[in-house]
Image (cartoon, rainbow, N blue to C red):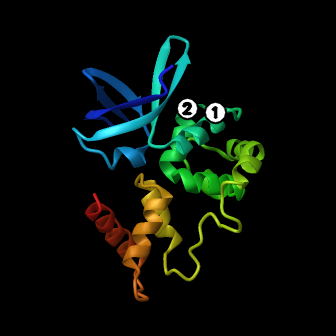
Amino acid sequence: MIGMLRGKVWEIQTDKLVLDVQGTGYLLTVAYGLLSKLHSGQELVLYTHVVLREEELSLYGFSSLAEKEIFLQMLTVSGIGPKAALSILSTLGLTQAQSAIAGENLTMLTKVPGIGKKTAQRLVLELREKFKGKVGSGESYISLEGTGIQSEAVETLLALGFSLEEAKKALAQILTEGRELSVEEQVKEALGAIASQK
């Protein structure tokens, strides 16, 4: 079993990357949030999980052991396969995914592509107790009150493929000193802020 790989990024695809480990190229499916931060030739360590289905062998890569752990826990839930679990991590990010499940936030979970209400309810039912210890006490999943951030702006950035963590960070960055911007202006400036960090 392959538990970890260390090498250089050889190629970046839509939802995968090829990692060159001493001349052997491993094709790994990884979260979008990680892909968006990488470039060819970059040194990278990935914690891995192998999924064998019928005649297909897939390798999934994670930037931390905590991310791999939540992925494996989500796989124990009926109706959640590797693609759905990775979609949750790609859309929400590690911290926000844990917080959404522990806080029973079905609204945010169902914003993840491929996750319907019943699947979200199963995730919450089966994993909320496991995740409650990992989420700060009283931490709300998404608190926009008093920040000036429009929820529509957050939703637009999520739809564009950014994680909730990235969206909130970028929007908080542009809304300094009580600036008031329309949803369109918030999205436009947030995209600029995210681009400047890469």
Q: Does 70 appear above or below 181?
A: above
Task: Identify which amino acid the numbered label 2 is placed on.
Answer: Pro
Q: Toward which corner of the image does residue 100 lie, by quadrant?
A: bottom right
Q: Pointer 1: what residue?
A: 75
Residue 39 horizontal side relative to residue 56, left or right: left
Are the residues flagged by discs 1 and 2 in contact, CB closer than 8 Å? Answer: yes
Task: Identify which amino acid the numbered label 1 is placed on.
Answer: Leu
Q: Residue furthest bottom?
A: 178
Instruction: Please name whichever residue, 91 or 33, is drawn nearer the observer in this view of the structure.
Output: 33
| Label 1 or label 2, whichever comes before in sequence order | 1
Q: Does 2 appear above or below 9?
A: above
Q: Name the element at disc 1.
A: helix
Which mark is drawn over residue 198? none
- The image quadrant where one finds the C terminus is bottom left
Image coordinates of residue 62 in percent, x first then y, are 46, 39
Image coordinates of residue 29 in percent, x first then y, are 42, 32
Q: Pointer 2: what residue?
A: 82
Residue 150 horizontal side relative to residue 177, left or right: right
Q: Name the element at disc 2.
A: helix
Q: Toward which corner of the image does residue 183 lie, by quadrant?
A: bottom left
Kindly identify the residue that appears in the image at 63 percent across and 52 percent down: 98
Q: Residue furthest top?
A: 55
Kindly identify the residue that appears in the image at 27 percent across and 34 percent down: 8
Residue 31 visible, this angle: yes
Residue 113 visible, this angle: no
Image coordinates of residue 87 in percent, x first then y, are 51, 42
- Cα separation, mark 1 vs mark 2, equals 7 Å
